[in-house]
Image: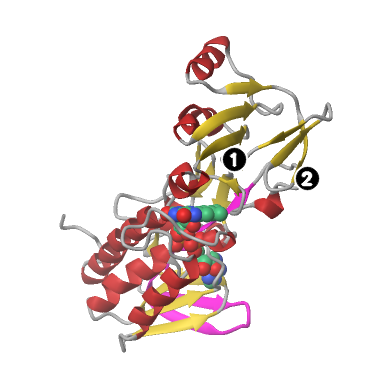
């Protein structure tokens, strides 16, 4: 019986596991290795690791964790878990069972993208979601923003900081007059023609046949928990402006006692730094819950 099973051994899960093993607790990390930023060659904006490939950041952190004798690592996919606080049983898709007093879900999210031919295969390369992560490298060249959800308007508004911006409403966004005026004041070019497909690096081909070239296309994806593991165990979900996440308390406990969650699956906005910070906090709160299951003292 482990003290904690961490499901998802990426930035959030590893940051939590590090706090817990340093508190001399026994931790099992089960990870399928499908990190959200696996489509990108470099990760930016994470202090001390700016511009380092995601795999390298992960490998270095994972090696440091594996040096702790009270840390076990299992490569695999958790299919379901059951039980209650103090006695959970986790089952993988290969039928392996593991037990623990607490569970921490750091299972990340999946990105839902607009259904435009040519878009998905450019995800993480020339179709991007976060200008703080990937805007600087575009060297002020022209940028497209494609509307997809209410946050797209905000993205169009800030994007001129990184290059001349065209906002494609693409039938997904009907702008009010004041919103149009605001974007025009920000220097954004508005285009209401529907998009037919994406070609080349980031060329947008419109329904009327015109082709417009950009250095990159930005889209605010909708995000949802990467699988139904938490929901199947009874953890409640909540809506946010670009999808859904797990409901957690200020101590990162889900609506199921003894089951905690951190990282992209349990907070917005999303970044490696936020996932790590959330993981550190969650690790400490899981530790506190092991000491005092009622979490009574503050
Ligand atoms: P993830 O990194 O998504 O990891 C979740 C882990 O859980 C995965 O390893 C997965 O396999 C595992 N898992 C899920 N379900 C199970 C299960 N049932 N059993 C076992 N394992 C499971 N952020 C930045 O700060 N800088 C960037 O440059 C940057 N670039 C990005 C580029 C792209 C294309 C995208 C989409 C995102 C980018 N991000 C970037 C955001 C960043 O990737 C996320 O915020 C971060 O990965 C969240 O970490 P996490 O640990 O919460 O989840
Ligand atoms: Mg997560």
**Label 2: few (<14), some or many (≥20) within 10 Å?**
few
Numbered range of the magenta stretch: 87-112
> For this rendering, which residue is in front, 285 or 255?
285
The residue tagged 2 is 117
Picture coordinates of residue 94, whole percent (x, y): 63, 82
Residue 34 falls within the magenta-colored stretch: no
Picture coordinates of residue 240, whole percent (x, y): 49, 39
Q: Which mark is residue 16?
A: none
Secondary structure beneath disc 1?
strand
> In the image, is residue 125 above or below residue 159?
below
Q: Is residue 275 left or right of residue 168?
A: left
Picture coordinates of residue 31, whole percent (x, y): 51, 74
Q: Is residue 144 left or right of residue 71?
A: right
In terms of sequence position, does the residue under pointer 2 or pointer 1 come before the other?
2
Q: CA distance from mark 2 to mark 1?
A: 14 Å
User: Residue at left 47%, top 36%?
Assistant: 162
Pick the quarter of the image with the N terminus: bottom left
User: Residue 205 falls in which quadrant of the image?
Assistant: top right
> For this rendering, which residue is in front, 196 or 4?
196
Pick the quarter of the image with the C terminus: bottom left
Residue 99 falls within the magenta-colored stretch: yes
Observer able to see residue 61: yes
The residue tagged 1 is 219
């Amino acid at each position: 019986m482990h003290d904690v099973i961490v499901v998802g051994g990426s930035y959030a899960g590893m940051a939590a596991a590090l706090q817990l093993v340093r508190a001399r607790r026994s931790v099992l990390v089960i990870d399928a290795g499908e990190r959200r930023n696996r489509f990108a060659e470099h990760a930016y904006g994470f202090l001390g690791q700016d511009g380092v490939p995601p795999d390298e950041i992960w490998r270095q952190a994972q090696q440091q964790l594996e040096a702790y004798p009270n840390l076990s690592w299992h490569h695999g996919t958790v299919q379901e878990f059951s039980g209650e606080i103090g006695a959970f049983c986790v089952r993988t898709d290969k039928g392996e069972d593991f037990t623990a007093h607490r569970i921490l879900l750091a299972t990340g999210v999946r990105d839902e993208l607009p259904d435009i031919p040519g878009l998905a295969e450019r995800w993480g390369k020339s179709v991007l979601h976060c200008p703080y992560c990937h805007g600087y490298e575009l060297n002020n060249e022209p940028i497209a923003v494609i509307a997809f959800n209410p946050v797209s308007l905000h993205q169009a508004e800030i994007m001129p900081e990184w290059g001349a911006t065209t906002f494609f409403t693409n039938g997904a966004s009907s702008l009010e007059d004041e919103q149009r005026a605001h974007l025009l004041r920000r220097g954004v070019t508005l285009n209401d023609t529907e998009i037919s497909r994406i070609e080349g690096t980031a060329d947008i081909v419109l329904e009327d046949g015109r082709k417009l070239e950009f250095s990159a296309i930005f889209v605010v994806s909708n995000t949802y928990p990467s699988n139904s593991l938490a929901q199947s165990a009874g953890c409640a979900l909540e809506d946010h402006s670009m999808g859904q996440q797990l409901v957690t308390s200020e101590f990162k406990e889900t609506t199921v006692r003894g089951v905690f969650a951190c990282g992209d699956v349990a907070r917005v906005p999303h970044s490696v730094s936020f996932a790590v910070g959330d993981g550190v906090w969650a690790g400490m709160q899981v530790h506190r819950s092991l000491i005092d299951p009622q979490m009574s003292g503050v």
